Image (tube, coloured by chain):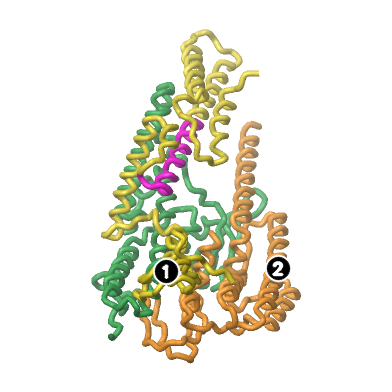
Amino acid sequence: MPLTLTQRCCHLLAPLIPFTVVFIHLSDDDGVRQVFEEMRGLYDQNVAAANDSTADPDGTAISSIAIRHAALERNKRCLMAYVFNRSKKLRNMRWQFGSILPPEIKANLCEPEIQWFNSYSKCLARYMKSIGGQGLNLAQDVKPPKSLYVEVRSLIDYGKFELDNGEVVLLKKHSTHLMSRAQCEPLIIQGVLEQINH
Amino acid sequence: MEDTFGEDDYFGEDEHIPAHEVLQTLEDAWLNEKFCPDLLPSQDSYVEAMMEQIQQMEDNLTKLKKTDFRVEVHHMELARIRYIITSYLRTRIEKIEQNTAFILEQETTRSPENPHLSEGELNYAREFLALQENHQKQLVLKHVPPPFQDFMSTQQSLVPNLRSHIFLRAKKDVNGVVIEGDRDTRDEEVDLEENSQHIMQYKPIANLIHDGSVQLI
Amino acid sequence: MDPSEVEFIAEKELVSIVPNFTNSEVHLISGDVGPFRAGLPVNVPIWMALNLRQRQKCRIIAPDWLDVEKLEALKEEEKSNRFFTKMPSEHYMVVAQLLLSAVDDDIPRVEEIRMAVKDLWDVRISKLRSSVDTFIKTGGSHARLDYLTTMEINSVRPLLPHALDFIDRLQKASEGASRRDMASQD
């Protein structure tokens, strides 16, 4: 049995519920196109019915017009909600990735959406610059700060290393040191230091 | 070297509000905003004052020796304050983006002495709404039958749920809070004792946040 | 609220430390701390205590209530009280977690204390769960929650407020429907 209009609209919204990063390309979306077509059909029926001068003794014509109208309103809202939620996902990407979209994402966006993203990005940047007179990057400091120190062992004779607090330490093979996680992380990644686990 | 910075800072031309009070106000505002379904009045003057304090502090810290143990402690505190400010402003932006048309319309009904949006937020809200309108026109509205091409009518229906439930602590005694009854129950009048904690609908206590009688938790 | 934010708020609470260095007062924006005299106890916010402890600049002194016997007494009181007991700290659970994991030898009987805190937490949470259950079933919209701590309140978010919101929406919808029914009966 063919899907009713509103059922089709709900199907549009369903993929948004698991919030995945992958977008279906909007202009390829069969669902959206079909909704437009059927809205046109319903509307044409209503115009025809309204212009029909034949009598409507039991009021069924009026009721049908009202029902089609309600369906048209509802479907418009579904479509707008769909577009609104897509733009919300885009918005979240601006906050997560900054103003440059990863190419995999861009490939699934239509031109108006890419433009929306760029405009949103600029709009947001303007606001952030206006904060407190000097500007403030709201996309940073997303988690409360935490002091984290770790004990590390030097794996090689690295030599002198200046810590954030100005102290200069000598990283010799097997020497142990206490450092903030932020500072030693790059050195751990490089293989200069290893974390000591107790 | 005498620790000369961190003295009580002034705020505004006539008022001398100590920095720690400014900070406390911002912390309270941060929590209220986080838990409130509606957008509360902007505390942008406090935000600005605190950001100036932070800048001053950071400048002063460059004058201290790096090995001074106070440097790291101060930096930690500044990171904590920055977190409160950014989280506060982020929460507000999210609300503005969710209910843009409604928030802008509400703002027009307010007197100029009682804005809920800062100037930056107001400009942002207008620009954002224009972005959304254009976007919807491009992708949806110009493809639907003419009588249904109106953007604002749908937008204005996105409103916050003022009947949603919140947790609060009474900061002072508050008497006679009226909780609306429904079909089966009558209106109830509740007294909030100082320091008591409650769960209830936001609407009956909305004005109590503004005057500092309750804190959302 | 994210647990990391509950922790963030709890870290403002003061705790006693014994520094191994000497320094004059520190003028933080949130208030003055110190002066620091090596070997003498001084109160600092927990976030600062943790940082100094990590840098091996101090020893942390457990608050009075972070003690096995005291915690077990609190648990017994909680069991026998129909309502919630006032806790010695607004953030007892978080403070206990933070301090107990930060210290190696500073605080004796760490494991026993950890268990005692957990037992107390379990009693209170179980009481909270059944109160919430009863509350929703009786159709209430407002309740008093004195002496519940931040972490405990957070544990019923968003479920409790959302459930109440949902019930409210259903009630409003059914009111609207019955009004329409009444109108159409003319």
- Please check whether the numbered discs 2 and 1 fall on a single chain: no
Check contact, mark 2 vs mark 1: CB within 8 A. no
Q: Could you tell me which residue is drawn at 34 percent across and 58 percent down?
A: B114
Q: In this view, does A122 lie above or below B143?
A: below
Q: Which chain is orange?
A: C
Q: Can you tell which quarter of the image residue A187 is in?
A: bottom left
Q: Which amino acid does label 2 sit on?
A: Asp
Expressed as whole percent of the image width and height from the top left, the position of residue C128 reads 68, 64
Q: Does the magenta stretch include residue C126?
A: no
- Visible residue check, residue A4: yes
Pointer 2 local density, CA inside 10 Å: few below 14, some 14–19, many at least 20: few
The answer for which chain carries disc 1 is A
- Disc 2 chain ID: C
User: In the figure, C134 relative to A23: above or below?
Assistant: below
- Give the green chain's letter: B
Q: Does the magenta stretch mainly form a helix, a strand or a loop?
A: helix
Q: Provide residue B164's location: percent of width, then percent of height.
A: 55, 52
- In this rendering, is residue B51 above or below C104? above
Res A157 label: 1
Q: What stretch is highlighted in magenta?
A: A77-99
Question: Where is residue A108, by image quadrant?
Answer: top left
Asked whether residue A88 is drawn in magenta, I would say: yes
